[in-house]
Image (cartoon, rainbow, N blue to C red):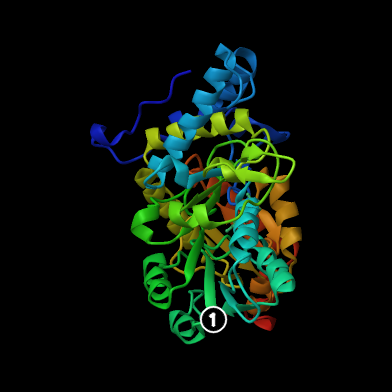
Amino acid sequence: MCLPKRNRHESGKTMLDTKKIRKDFKILNRKIWAGKTLVYFDNAATTQKPQVVIDSLVNYYENYNANIHRGVHKLAEEATEAYEKVREKVRDFVGATKNDEVIFTRNTTESINLLAYSLGESLEEGDEVLISEMEHHSNIIPWYLLRDRKKITVKFIPITKNYELDYSALEKLINKKTKIISITHKSNVLGTVNDIKRIAQIAKNNGSILIIDAAQSVPHMKVDFQDLGCDFLVFSSHKMCGPTGVGVLVGKKELLEKMPPFLGGGEMIRKVTFEGFTPNDVPWKFEAGTPNIADVIAFGTAIDYIESLGIENIYKYECGLTEYCLSKLKQFDFLKIYNSSGTGIVTFSNPLVHPHDIATIVDQYGVAIRAGHHCAQPLMKRLNVSATARASFYFYNTKEEIDLFIEALKKAFDYFKVGACKKLNPVGG
Ligand code: 7TS
């Protein structure tokens, strides 16, 4: 198993060698239909996995599969060491200070549920949680569940007509009852990147805990937990070349220590008696039962892979792809495009054609995009649509693929005669 040594910062180059990179992803050569090679533009849903990550999974099961933190035999020691090493990698990758600040969960959704449950225990009737109108359901429902359990209030920070967070509204909404602010770093629909440092200052001045849903940011841009100034940061391995089934919760140790456990069972205890139990130290207090050992280890390989490319390089490259795609989409002047200053995600719609129909037609040309509400129904309501189409990029995508996508879109719009009817259905503004 060897990681690509290309494009390291010391080489002085910042451009990614996409041709070489694409060789690491066999799936990108897959023929989806006769003569149509896959163009994978659904990276906000999940990313593809390079061969080293797949090899890492197989290597674990073939050579040192064992349960961790318990056996004294060699296999168990090797597996434990490999698993705990990934905690260090995650710590360094997102700029946490200590290993104990990194907790492995199943996904971003579980990380937020853990926080809503465990932090939520200290909330009292009448307390408030602030989220935003651009949240994924996984940062809405856990707070609704807490609302129903604790009789708290959940409030939404609105977005502006430019699809940015309304910071002045946030300043008005926040008050002494606001115990938690939980907000996305980057919208999975709009691509908007929120100014977390600014929000962190507002939260700190008010004494509120700040949770950042970084599911769409950590894979695509430099994210530094300490620099952002938040209290908790959550994201998923599968959106950054790692396997499914692994999520991360990074949190300030002093807060994690005060929080009650989320799930009970093996691993999360120090002592159990006939009368009760003493919880383990963090992070294990929050990792009940046998964890997802193989996938966590392969996630470590994914982090190595991303680091070998350089997250800043990835970010710059995706900015170029996004600009290119937006410039090409301009020719379809009947489309409403819902993009702010964000990168990596391009979302659009037209009232004459359902986004699912667009996605179905471009799929016939091998292009995989997502259509629907993107698990953000309140945002759809705010945008006044029931669904949109979305193309989302990663570092292995190319401008040539965007050209194919645009050609496929042309066919779709011709088929539905969307352009011809545009005067009847203006979508500007
Ligand atoms: N938060 C954001 C901002 C997301 O985009 C997603 C998944 C999640 C949380 C949940 O992540 P999970 O790993 O727990 O499922 N977003 C998407 C998407 O945009 N299309 O499919 C999944």
Relative side of 42 to 95, left or right: right
Viewer-proximal residue among 322 and 165: 165
Query: Can you tell which quarter of the image residue 154 is in?
Result: bottom right
Query: Can you tell which quarter of the image residue 70 is in?
Result: top right
Relative side of 347 to 310, left or right: right
Query: Can you tell which quarter of the image residue 146 is in?
Result: bottom right
Residue 44 in view (yes/no): yes
Amino acid bearing label 1: Lys
Relative side of 239 to 362, left or right: left
Q: Quadrant of the C terminus?
A: bottom right
Q: Is residue 132 above or below residue 114?
A: below
Q: Is residue 186 above or below residue 60?
A: below
The x, y position of residue 209, in whole percent, is 48, 67
Residue 106 in view (yes/no): no
The x, y position of residue 50, in whole percent, is 54, 30
Residue at (35%, 46%) from the top-left corner?
Answer: 312
Residue at (59%, 20%) from the top-left corner?
Answer: 60
Packing grade of label 1 (10 A; few <14, some 14-19, many >=20) is some
The residue that disc 1 covers is 177
Under circle 1, the secondary element is: loop
Viewer-proximal residue among 371 and 106: 106
Q: Which quarter of the frame holds ligand 1?
A: bottom right
The x, y position of residue 106, in whole percent, is 64, 44
Viewer-proximal residue among 49 and 65: 65
